[in-house]
Image (cartoon, grey):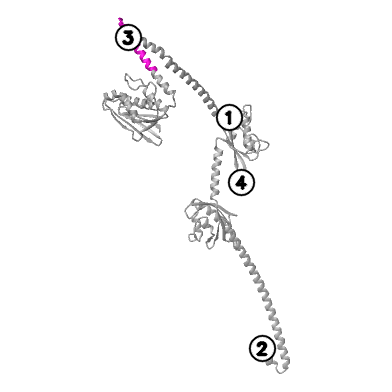
């Protein structure tokens, strides 16, 4: 610019101005121009420095904000999402992977993927609330719904959202955080169930504070409806008060109350039974427990008390004790009567039989007297047999713990067969024995021999006239028990009519002249005396099966 101005001046004013003046003008112009441009440059530099400083501060704020966001995202277990509404573009943080199991390739970039993962039962309700919020029909948005995980299961979530708008007030962006509340929901459901149990329980339930004041029951904070029903006190009459939970009266057990207070002092569980009184002073028996509840630090926080009205139970217990005393006395009386019947009658009965034997040697000419004596002799012998049967029963009943030993079933049956050799030879039954699985039985030898003798005798006695008698006797081992099965194809018993009478004393089901109805009663008594059980399965004209079980 200085050169151009110098050329112009020299062209138009060269004749009038001396060269020195031109030189001074040039120098002045150059200096002025330099100062002017320096001023302009300094202004621009200050402006650029201010702009750079502002950009630097802005970048620092953005960096700090991003760092805070990253820290919050790492610190929280929430799943954070960022939804650009107009573009329908949504981004998720790493919570979508750690909480719900989705890898980045599975996660969709639109809101449709999000809504598709909401449980069908929750989807419509959640969508209506969300879009009402976007349209500003509601002030804030948060909702609970079920969100599907990558494995197909659902988690309960709490979702909260924040809306961003442009200068025209239009919603352009929404940022939210999804919190997994599945455990809280499960806990809520569990607590609701527990609350239902407590409120519906027929037992009285109370909750008290931890600390006891002046040796009294701690202050009550809750009572269930059953307490009011049992005691007559309404919740408002007792909650918040430090009072005895049961009313003492003339028949209450003070020692039980001391036991309770001692347990509270020592922070121990306690169970007592005492007589309590309702608000109307009515007496009732109560079973009362106090259970301490400790927090995570092992410090007692509350006491839970469970009370049950056991008045009816106590009445039944009293009646039972009275009945036991009466039965015990009756049993003693019956035993005494049995001894008198079986022992005291035997001496005169033996004398009577001896006299009858002497009369047999005296010739009688009167036929009527002879007939009377014959009938008297028969009745005397029947009475003697009855007395002997009673003695057998008494012996069994008076020896509940018989001596046991290792007994060979094969040897027992050989003894039984030898005693019934005449009947076996006469009727020639087919008998099958199988004792290989239980060769030895831990039992009383005399009793097991008597049992098998009675059963075998009955099988022969009550055989069918229409078929060959078959008898099968087997022994099996089941766990720690020996099962003895005695089966025949005799005439059988009608169990529909006589099941309850089969093992009764003097019960006869067939018209046989020598049947006394004592055998099965003795069998059952002997089996039970040895700690076993016996059952019967029988059908008329098909046969009978006895199953005897012993611990072995």
Relative depth, front residue between 177 and 94: 94
Q: Read off the residue under disc 4.
A: 297
Relative depth, front residue between 533 and 71: 533
Mark carried by residue 285: 1
Q: Read off the residue under disc 3.
A: 360
Which span is picked out in magenta?
Answer: 359-387
Q: Quadrant of residue 203?
A: top right
Q: CA distance from mark 3 to mark 4?
A: 99 Å
CB contact under 8 Å: marks 3 and 1: no
Which of disc 1 and disc 3 is earlier in sequence? 1
Mark toward the viewer: 2 or 4: 4
Task: Answer few, some or many: residues within 10 Å of disc 3's Cα (few below 14, many 20 plus, some between 14 and 19).
Answer: few
Q: Residue furthest top?
A: 365
Q: Quadrant of residue 223?
A: top right
Task: Answer few, some or many: residues within 10 Å of disc 1's Cα (few below 14, many 20 plus, some between 14 and 19).
Answer: some
Residue 458 picture location, percent across and down: 33, 24
Q: Read off the residue under disc 2.
A: 3
CB contact under 8 Å: marks 3 and 4: no
Where disc 3 sits, the SS reads helix
Relative depth, front residue between 117 and 130: 117
Which of disc 3 and disc 2 is earlier in sequence? 2
Magenta region, main secondary structure: helix
Q: CA distance from mark 2 to mark 3?
A: 186 Å
Q: Is residue 96 left or right of residue 381?
A: right
Q: Is residue 17 left or right of residue 98?
A: right
**Image quarter of the C terminus:** top left
Q: Is residue 497 visible?
A: no
Where disc 1 sits, the SS reads strand
| 265 in magenta | no
Where disc 2 sits, the SS reads helix
Query: What residue is at 55 percent from the left and 46 percent from the top?
Result: 188
| 367 in magenta | yes
């Amino acid at each position: 610019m200085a050169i151009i101005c110098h050329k112009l001046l020299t062209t138009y004013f060269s004749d009038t101005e001396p060269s020195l003046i031109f030189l001074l003008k040039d120098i002045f112009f150059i200096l002025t121009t330099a100062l002017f441009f320096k001023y302009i440059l300094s202004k621009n530099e200050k402006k650029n420095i201010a702009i750079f400083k502002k950009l630097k501060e802005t970048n620092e704020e953005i960096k700090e904000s991003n760092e805070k966001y990253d820290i919050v995202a790492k610190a929280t277990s929430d799943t954070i999402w960022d939804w650009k509404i107009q573009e329908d573009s949504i981004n998720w943080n790493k919570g979508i992977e750690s909480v719900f199991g989705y890898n980045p390739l599975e996660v969709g970039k639109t809101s449709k993927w999000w809504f598709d993962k909401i449980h069908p039962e929750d989807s419509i309700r959640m969508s209506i609330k969300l879009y009402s919020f976007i349209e500003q029909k509601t002030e804030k948005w948060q909702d609970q719904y079920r969100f599907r995980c990558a494995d197909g299961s659902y988690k309960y979530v709490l979702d909260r959202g924040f809306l961003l708008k442009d200068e025209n007030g239009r919603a352009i962006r929404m940022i939210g955080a999804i919190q997994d509340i599945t455990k809280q929901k499960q806990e809520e459901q569990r607590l609701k169930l527990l609350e239902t149990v407590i409120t519906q329980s027929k037992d009285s339930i109370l909750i008290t504070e931890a600390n006891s004041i002046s040796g009294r029951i701690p202050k009550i904070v809750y009572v269930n409806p059953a307490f009011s029903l049992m005691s007559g006190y309404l919740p408002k009459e007792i909650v918040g008060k430090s009072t005895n939970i049961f009313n003492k009266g003339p028949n209450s057990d003070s020692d039980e109350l001391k036991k309770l207070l001692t347990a509270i002092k020592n922070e121990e569980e306690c169970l007592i039974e005492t007589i309590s009184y309702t608000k109307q002073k009515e007496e009732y028996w109560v079973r009362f427990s106090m259970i301490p509840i400790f927090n995570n630090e092992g410090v007692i926080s509350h006491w839970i008390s469970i009370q049950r009205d056991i008045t009816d139970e106590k009445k039944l217990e009293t009646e039972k004790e009275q009945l036991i005393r009466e039965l015990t006395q009756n049993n003693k009386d019956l035993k005494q009567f049995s001894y008198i019947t079986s022992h005291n009658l035997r001496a005169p009965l033996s004398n009577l039989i001896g006299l009858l034997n002497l009369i047999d040697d005296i010739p009688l000419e009167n036929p009527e007297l002879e007939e009377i004596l014959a009938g008297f002799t028969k009745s005397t012998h029947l009475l003697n047999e009855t007395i002997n049967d009673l003695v057998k029963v008494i012996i069994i009943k008076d020896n509940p713990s018989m001596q046991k030993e290792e007994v060979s079933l094969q040897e027992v049956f050989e003894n039984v067969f030898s005693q019934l050799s005449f009947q076996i030879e006469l009727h020639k039954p087919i008998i099958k024995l199988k004792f290989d699985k239980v060769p030895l039985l831990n039992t009383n030898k005399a009793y097991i021999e008597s049992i098998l003798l009675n059963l075998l005798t009955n099988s022969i006695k009550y055989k069918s006239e229409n078929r060959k008698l078959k008898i099968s006797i087997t022994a099996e081992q089941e766990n720690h028990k020996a099962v003895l099965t005695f089966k025949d194809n005799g005439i059988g018993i009608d169990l529909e009519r006589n099941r309850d009478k089969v093992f009764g004393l003097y019960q006869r089901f067939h018209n046989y002249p020598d049947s006394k109805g004592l055998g099965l009663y003795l069998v059952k008594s002997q089996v039970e005396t040895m700690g076993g059980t016996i059952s019967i399965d029988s059908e008329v004209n098909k046969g009978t099966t006895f199953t005897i079980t012993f611990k072995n």
